Image (cartoon, rainbow, N blue to C red):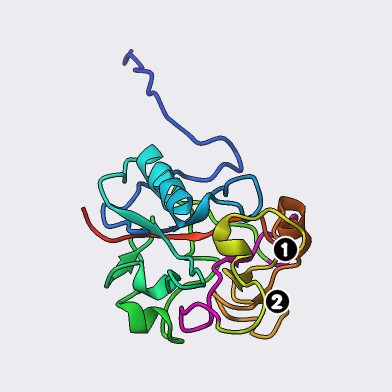
Amino acid sequence: MRKLVPILVMTLAAGAQAVHAQSAQMNFFLTSAGSGDGANLGGLQGADQICQDRAYAVGAGDLIWRAYLSTTGESGENARDRIGDGPWYNFAGTMVARDVDDLHSENNLLGKENSLTERGEPVNGRGDSPNMHDIITGSTMDGMASDADGDSTCENWTSNSGDGSALVGHHDRVGGGQNPTSWNSAHASRGCGQEDLQGTGGNGFFYCFGIGS
């Protein structure tokens, strides 16, 4: 009688999602968490450090990471000038934009499917609970700091007050506001505190770009 040899079969639990490997090209992600203190990120330096720490935690810390955030005032910076030249690839290895101009055009591939976190996970969008599609940028649609009156950067990312505001984009490219399909400049937030950001459909997340080692 032939002897039966047990075969070890590895299966995923029912309903579980397969784990995909991180692309070695990854130099773009949406943070899986913000500062936890609303739009108070510790300024640009603090925001950059959050990007660096998130990337380091998933083995991508060898790049120099910069937050896609604009600031205003005499020493203000434009988000588009902070992130290098591209091209940019997400966790899955999809090229989301070829260069800065492509990124700020209708040709980019940003959206809920491709704007993945550093862990390769999608972020809740409109229709999900809770909605977290408002991504803080402080930027106009072309990636520049706003020259309009009023606060558009939550005091250059140092405020968690209910009095200020920040320009936000919709990572899923849907919703309300002046530019509902814009990934970087859909409307202004209700305030700068964590509850304020959550109240308009966000959670204090922002975009990070790697600019080389």
Q: Quadrant of residue 138?
A: bottom right
Q: From the viewer's perspective, tell me whether residue 41 is left or right of residue 129.
A: left
Where is residue 109? Give x, y as percent: 43, 75
Asked if the magenta segment contains residue 137, the reply would be yes
Residue plotted at (38% across, 47% down): 52
- On the image, numbered disc 2 is attached to which residue? 175
Q: Is residue 158 left or right of residue 75?
A: right
The residue nearer to you, when weighing 207 against 161, is 161
- Tell me the kind of residue under disc 2: Gly
Where is mark 1, residue-wise? 201
Cβ–Cβ below 8 Å for labels 2 and 1?
Answer: yes
Mark before the other along the chain sequence, 2 or 1? 2
- Specify the segment rendered in magenta: 126-146
Q: Residue 189, located in which quarter of the rendered image?
A: bottom right
What is the chief secondary structure element of the magenta stretch? Answer: loop
- Number of numbered discs: 2
Residue 29 picture location, percent across and down: 43, 58
